Image (spheres, rainbow, N blue to C red):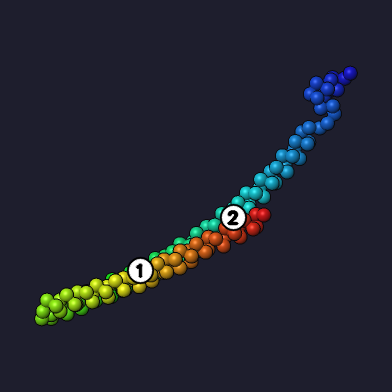
Amino acid sequence: MSESVQKENLNGTNGVALPGVFGVLAEQGIARAQANCEKIKIASEQISESLRETYSANSEGATSYGLKVIEISNANNAATMDFFVHLLGSKSVTDVINLSAEQARKTFVATSAQNRELWELAQKLAKEASEPVRKRVASVFQKAS
């Protein structure tokens, strides 16, 4: 046997060009890795855009919620001041008791309505804030499938 044939038999290749096969496999692996990296890059950009949209929605929602809280505070302060004005104008203990009971009833009704309004606003804001993320994530997973 010639020396080259003996080396091939010792390497166990029996004449198969392994470097060529490995080269093709390596190229295929690199191509797949590059394609996957590109998909990840696109998904990352889409998620970043979604986060920007979410931040914008959160910012608007927080502003709306804050303005509603200020509006409610102003209404409550005005109601309290009206109560004190009427209380100072009371002429008897019976008037003070009646005014206090009426004020307590009004405060309970107003607070219940205000809490309901704030709760509904908070739910709306949470839904609006999560919508861009939900849409983007669904889109990313749909494209990846």
Residue position for label 2 = 43
- Tag in front: 1 or 2: 1
Q: Residue furthest right?
A: 1
Does any portion of residue 61 appear in the rendered image?
Answer: no
Give the structural element (helix, strand or loop) at label 2: helix
**Image height of 114 relative to 10, above or below:** below
Does any portion of residue 20 appear in the rendered image?
Answer: yes
Q: Is residue 100 left or right of residue 16?
A: left
Q: Residue furthest front?
A: 94
Residue position for label 1 = 115
* Depth order, front residue of 90/30: 90
Give the CA distance from mark 1 to mark 2.
40 Å
Image point (61%, 57%), residue name: 140
Which percent across, then down, holds residue 70?
31, 71
Q: In which image quadrant can residue 47 be found?
A: bottom right
Amino acid on which disc 2 is placed: Ala
Q: Residue furthest left?
A: 91
Which percent across, then down, holds residue 99?
19, 77
Which percent across, then down, holds residue 114?
34, 71
* Depth order, front residue of 34/83: 83
Q: For mark 1, does the 10 Å Cα neighbourhood hold few (<14), some (14 to 19), or many (20 or more) residues?
A: few
Q: In which image quadrant can residue 115 be found?
A: bottom left
Which percent across, then down, holds residue 117?
38, 71
**Image height of 10 relative to 75, above or below:** above
* Depth order, front residue of 55/96: 96
Of callouts 1 and 2, the N-terminal one: 2
Image point (48%, 66%), residue name: 128
Image point (69%, 46%), residue name: 32
